[in-house]
Each structure stands twice: as C-alpha cells, then as structure tokens.
Amino acid sequence: VISMSQALNASGDMDEVSPSEKMRKMTKTIFNSLAEKNKDNSGFWWDFYVDFFQKAAESDHFDAFCYYIFQKSTDGEFRKWVKDNPKKVQDFKVWRNENKNAVKED
C-alpha cells in the first residue's frame, strides 16, 4: 500500500498539488486499500483501526481528520488550517469520539 502511494507521488500527477492535498490523496489511497483488504482479515488492528480509518475516509470529516493528524508536520499549512477552522476540528473530534470504538461487523 505504501509503495502504491509512493508511486502515485512519483507519477508526476501530484507535481502541482499543495502538500496538504498530496497528503489527503495519499492518506485516502492508503485507507481505501486497507478497507479492501479488511474484508478478508480480522484481529485487533483490522477490527478497530482499519474500520475506523475506512469510516474516516468516507466521512464528511476526512479533510479535518487529515489536517488534524498532520498539523505537527513541518509544513505550516496544516497548523494554519487547524487554527483557522476550529469548528471543523471540533466537529471532527465529536465524530471521532462517536466512532472510535466502532468494530466491523461479521
């Protein structure tokens, strides 16, 4: 999955894309790939983390999720977005708390 996201990055398709858009696209690619493999796997990682990541990728809070988790990166664009969008960040945190214990159903 990581190789695939690196290939996407190296393909030239993302040369004109901002760092935040690049990270969102790569994160969504990874989450979608994990979701495809989630159907055939089980265990703590698959049942808790991957299911949550899949729901995050499909939610209206995905952009806030990405900006929030990458705000400590070296690119100030992420921190600025978090600072400028406190309502979206708070809405994401509420969504996260409501969904963090969701487990995939067999």
Image: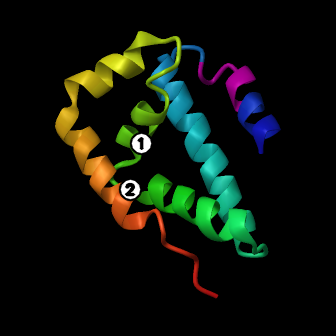
Q: Which one is nearer the viewer's eye here, 17 or 42?
A: 42
- Image depth: mark 2 or mark 1 in front: 2
Q: Position of residue 57 (x, y in %)?
A: 49, 53
In the image, residue 101 sits, relative to residue 14, either above or below, namely below
Mark 1, other Cα within 10 Å: few <14 / some 14–19 / many ≥20: many
In primary-sequence order, the first of circles 2 and 1 is: 1
Q: Which one is nearer the viewer's eye here, 98 or 39?
A: 98
Task: Residue at 70%, 68% (x, y): give it.
Answer: 44
Left or right: 103 in relation to 36: left
In the image, residue 39 sits, relative to residue 91, either above or below, namely below
Task: Judge whether residue 104 is colored magenta.
Answer: no
Q: Which residues are magenta?
A: 8-14
Compute the Cα span from label 2 to label 1.
9 Å
Left or right: 56 in relation to 64: right
The C terminus appears in which quarter of the rendering? bottom right
Task: Residue at 59%, 15% (x, y): give it.
Answer: 15
Q: Position of residue 64 (x, y in %)?
A: 35, 39
Kind of residue sitting beneath label 1 = Phe
Q: Position of residue 46 (x, y in %)?
A: 70, 66
Q: Secondary structure at mark 2?
A: helix
In the image, residue 81 sits, relative to residue 1, either above or below, namely above
Left or right: 42 in relation to 32: right
Discs 2, 1 touching: Cβ within 8 Å: yes
Q: Which residue is mark 2?
A: 96
Q: Which residue is mark 1?
A: 65
